[in-house]
Image: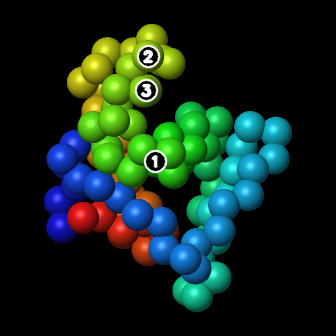
C-alpha cells in the first residue's frame, strides 16, 4: 500500500512507545521489532497519536517547523511508510 496524505493511521495494540529526554523507541511486542526515534520522529509519532489523519499531522508540523511544506510532506510520508513496513503502524 502506498502512503499518502489522505491516509489515516492507527497504532496496533502490540506496539509500545517510550520516551526519554526527547527521543523515543517503538517496540512491537508481538514481532520483537524495535525502532529508535530522534526528536523529530518522536514529535511526528506524538502528532500521529493525537490526530491519526496524516493531513492534520502535516498541518501541525508546518506550524512547528521552519521547513518547506514539500519537504515536510515527503519526510512525513516516508516516515509513516517505513513504520508501516515494519508493522509499527497501520494505514487506512
What crowding class fits label 3: few (fewer than 14 Cα within 10 Å), some (14-19), or many (20 or more)? Answer: many
Residue 83 x/y as whole percent? 43, 61
Q: Quadrant of the N terminus?
A: bottom left
Vertical comparison of 74 with 51: above or below: above
Q: Which disc is residue 14 wearing?
A: none
Q: Which disc is residue 61 wearing?
A: 3
Residue where numbered disc 2 is placed: 63
Residue 23 x/y as whole percent? 71, 43
Q: How far apart, in angstroms, are the residues tagged by discs 3 and 2?
A: 5 Å
In this rendering, does residue 72 appear at all?
A: no
Q: Quadrant of the C terminus?
A: bottom left
Identify the residue at horizontal 39%, vertical 51% (top origin): 52
Sequence-first disc among 1 and 3: 1
Element marked by disc 2: helix
Residues tagged 3 and 2 counted as in contact (Cβ below 8 A):
yes
Of residue 50 and residue 82, the one placed in the foreground of this image is 50
Element marked by disc 3: helix
Identify the residue at horizontal 48%, vertical 74% (top origin): 12
Vertical comparison of 79 with 14: above or below: above
Identify the residue at horizontal 51%, vertical 51% (top origin): 49
Identify the residue at horizontal 44%, vertical 16% (top origin): 63
In this rendering, does residue 48 appear at all?
A: yes
Amino acid at each position: 500500500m502506498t502512503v499518502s496524505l489522505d491516509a489515516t493511521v492507527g497504532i496496533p495494540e502490540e506496539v509500545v512507545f517510550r520516551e526519554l529526554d526527547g527521543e523515543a523507541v517503538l517496540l512491537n511486542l508481538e514481532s520483537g521489532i524495535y525502532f529508535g526515534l530522534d526528536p523529530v520522529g518522536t514529535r511526528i509519532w506524538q502528532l500521529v497519536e493525537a490526530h491519526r489523519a496524516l493531513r492534520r499531522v502535516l498541518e501541525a508540523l508546518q506550524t512547528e517547523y521552519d521547513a518547506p511544506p514539500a519537504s515536510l510532506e515527503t519526510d512525513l510520508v516516508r516516515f509513516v511508510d517505513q513504520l508501516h513496513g515494519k508493522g509499527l503502524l497501520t494505514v487506512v
